[in-house]
Image (spheres, coloured by chain):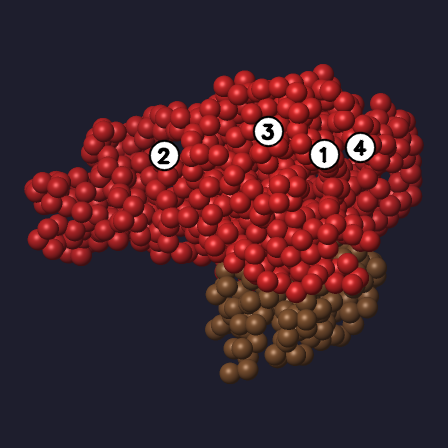
Amino acid sequence: MKTELNESTIFKVSRRDFLKSTSMSISGLLLGISFSCSDTSKKLVGNPDYVFSPNLFITINGNGDVTLIAHRSEMGTGIRTSLPLVMADEMEADWNRVKIVQAVGDEKYGNQNTDGSYSVRMFFTPLRKAGATVRLLLEQAAAKEWGVEVSECKAQNHEVVHTSGKSLGFGFLAEKAAALPLPDEASITLKSPKDFKYITKQSSIVDLKDIVTGKAKFGLDNNHLPNTKVAVIKRNPEPGAGMKSFTSDKAMKVPGVIKVFSLDAPGFPTFLNKPLGGVVVVAENTWAALEGRKAIEVTWNKGINADYDSHSYNNDMLKRAKEKGKVRRESGQVEKGLANAKKIIEADYVVPLLSHTPMETPCALAHVHDNICEVWAPVQDPQFTRKSLAEALGMDVKAVTVNVTLLGGAFGRKSKPDYVVEAALVSRTMGTPVKILWTREDDIQHDYYHFPAAQHLKVGIDENNKVTSWLHRSVFPPIDGTSNAKVNEATGLELSMGMIDLPYAIDNVCCETQVAQVKTRIGWLRSVANIHHAYAIGCTLDEVAKARGVDPIQNTLDMLGGDRMIDFAALAPEFWNYDEKIEDHPWSTARFRNVIETVKEKSSWGKKLPKGSGQGFAAHRSFLTYVACVVEVTVDANNKIRIPKVDYVVDCGIPVNPERIKSQFEGGAAFAASLALKSEITVSKGAVQQSNFNNYLVGRMSDSPYETAVHIIESNEKPTGVGEPPVPPFIPALCNAIYAATGKRVRQLPVRLA
Amino acid sequence: MATYQLNINGETRDVEAVPNTPLLWVLRDNLGLTGTKYGCGVAQCGACTVHLDGTAVRSCSTPVSTVGNKKVTTIEGLATADALHPVQQAWMQENVPQCGYCQSGQIMSAVALIEKNPTPSDSDIEAAMSGNICRCGTYERIRKAIKRASNTAAK
């Protein structure tokens, strides 16, 4: 899922490019860009044609304009704003003078795979250093200009000011700074947090006005290539199985249809970047393509999953969850502990297949011509997209350009570039630019689904009312099985998302798995295996609290034990710390305790509520971010569930962009409510039975929380991501609130009370 | 193919399309007005919402042949040369959008609501906005922005 990449390797990449691009700038200077255009009387601007690019991410023009590169994909988290803000703050640029340019897919930018809540965590420090280096260069240039010590010069708000009060603008200094040698890394000082101007402060996203005026460009909004055709594809309902034959006579009679042809199917497993194949209809416009597709008749092949039935598959997983499985974490003797327990809590939890359904369906514009390939596409992983295109087209990656548009939502779906490869293959066949559209039916019936999961938990409480034994079995088909049929049991990485990283101080713990063969395309969905693990554990803890006769929050704190850093690698050899070393991002029960205690206070936990209402609690660390959540529900006589209030407490280290942290938690609550209350994909005879929002239900306004209060812990710890962490604790908190309101336990999703 | 004369955002535009072509694709493919989005094609999600004579309709399910001389307003036609529409302003003040894809449709539904009902209650808002899905989950801020815009309109 991830390549090893730490801060120092990123910074080395950018330092190498520092040198390269600086020397390029200097040679550009030597090639004849004039020194003399600058208005030295004001000394705010220099040669307006001069471009100073001290590193890959930052450019200063002679006129003072600053261009910052956004290299991570914008799918709604605000990252296109947050990371440039970090650079602007460190370099003391005026945010109003900053323009953001979206990077193409290229390894030179370091990791661009926008998933795993990585962006801020991975790039906060390297981009601060990039900004601070530019600040120092500008200060050095001003010192040299004035013949004074650098220590007397300070960059602030787009100019460098001397202690005497005189100042020079960034534009004027750009060209002077370019002539200076790069400072040693050791001489670069980062700002003190108290001097932050943009980091930790409120700010709006850079695309806000374009979005509210309809000007923002998403995947299908680029109309700049003449003679662009539109393609849609009819695919076998059974992924990868291919076809026997098709007839196109009727389709070709639809006005506007140009060509109908087949695209090879990949077989099964399908891989993460190969198109599913099918019958392609290319037309002059979208409607003709859609009408043409309706008119095709296809005889499909039956493949190895033709008998896949999700209902019996899930029942079978649940049956196996009750049998002894493969041990993935073990301490003490769980069976003995359970045998000696005074009370036993035993429960099963089932979560269905789920679809991402971003509002923008998969789509792309591709133009393959003259041995090059250009695409404009909403992709989370532009480098993987580029490699996949090169591989599919038999081209060198250097011949492939991936322009990243805004993403109309993604949630993990757009990490997989199958749809972009489709667009390129069709463009090559047609010899014209081609836009590919996935209809909502295509999206819902051919997703990389969130895995279905069955879990069994058995907890023992001894005669002293202490929890002494914890048995957890988790059964689900692993994501890697979509690329490799031999991978048929949950991986350590997936189990580290909420199962084997169980933080509670229990003497006897055993975590087990069972085989589950992948039967359809499986892929990661916002917070991945944390969804079902946090659900089962959070609900079980509520049952344990009830059995112990203790308040649920107090129960969790009791079980958490004393403050400590947990060395999970010693407890479970497969433990994965979200690609970070445990010494850099320890598992701190003190931080976990703090969010739990804070949510108790902020939510007025235990307040008196009318009949039919209730509060529920859960807490979960995922993607290195600590979150506690209290959900309040009301359930009316018709079993309509409403969520008047949610309280989240989040400790994500330094809160880089608090406004977007809040929006991610509000949205994460609504997303999780949608998963828990509405959504379910079922499969019969290998085919997905849902097709659009009329039968694959998602949360609407009335299903979503009315008010989500997000309390952010003030911290100077390393910042961590917030895209995924809101989702996991919400679902058990919601289910526990439903129990408090109705007395009904929710052991299967989506919630069905009737 | 037939030729239709449409009134789009105050301008007369001639388009050629087969009669059952949804207005959505005429706007996007024929006229390059890409602010109106495709989300489901079956009037379930509201991403394609535009106004016909001030009433919110789902353009994905409105054949171009049925538009006639009704005035079509899209997201591109809401602001005047001088100022954004109060609903757009409220959307900015509340920092509503996340990914932004559904917001054109949300704003068009909200404008239609406020024009008919300048002081909508929570349940009025819920009813009027129930056809618009936002997968990022910006519903709380949408409600706040509508209230803010309605307060502005009442002043």
Q: What residue type is labelled 1?
A: Glu
The residue where tag 3 is placed is A468
Secondary element under disc 3, as helix, strand or loop, is: strand
Q: Chain A shown in which color?
A: red
The residue where tag 1 is placed is A346
In the depicted structure, whether residue B96 falls above or below residue A1: below
Q: Position of residue A646 (x, y in %)?
A: 57, 56
Q: In which quarter of the image is residue A472?
A: top right
Q: Are marks 2 and 3 in contact (CB under 8 Å)?
A: no
Q: Do labels 1 and 2 share a chain?
A: yes
The residue where tag 4 is placed is A314
> Residue at the location (74% across, 41% down)?
A747
Q: Earlier in the sequence, mark 3 or mark 4?
A: 4
- For the residues carrying marks 2 and 3, which lies nearer the camera in this image? 3
Q: Earlier in the sequence, mark 2 or mark 3?
A: 2
Q: Which of marks 1 and 2 is nearer the N terminus?
A: 2
Structural distance between the alpha carbons of marks 2 and 4: 45 Å
* Residue A284 in sight in this render: no
Q: Is residue A318 left or right of residue A564?
A: right
Q: What residue type is labelled 4?
A: Asn
**Category of crowding for the residue at label 3, using alpha-carbon neighbours closer than 10 angstroms: few (below 14), some (14–19), many (at least 20):** many
Q: Earlier in the sequence, mark 2 or mark 4?
A: 2
> Residue at the location (73% across, 45% down)?
A746
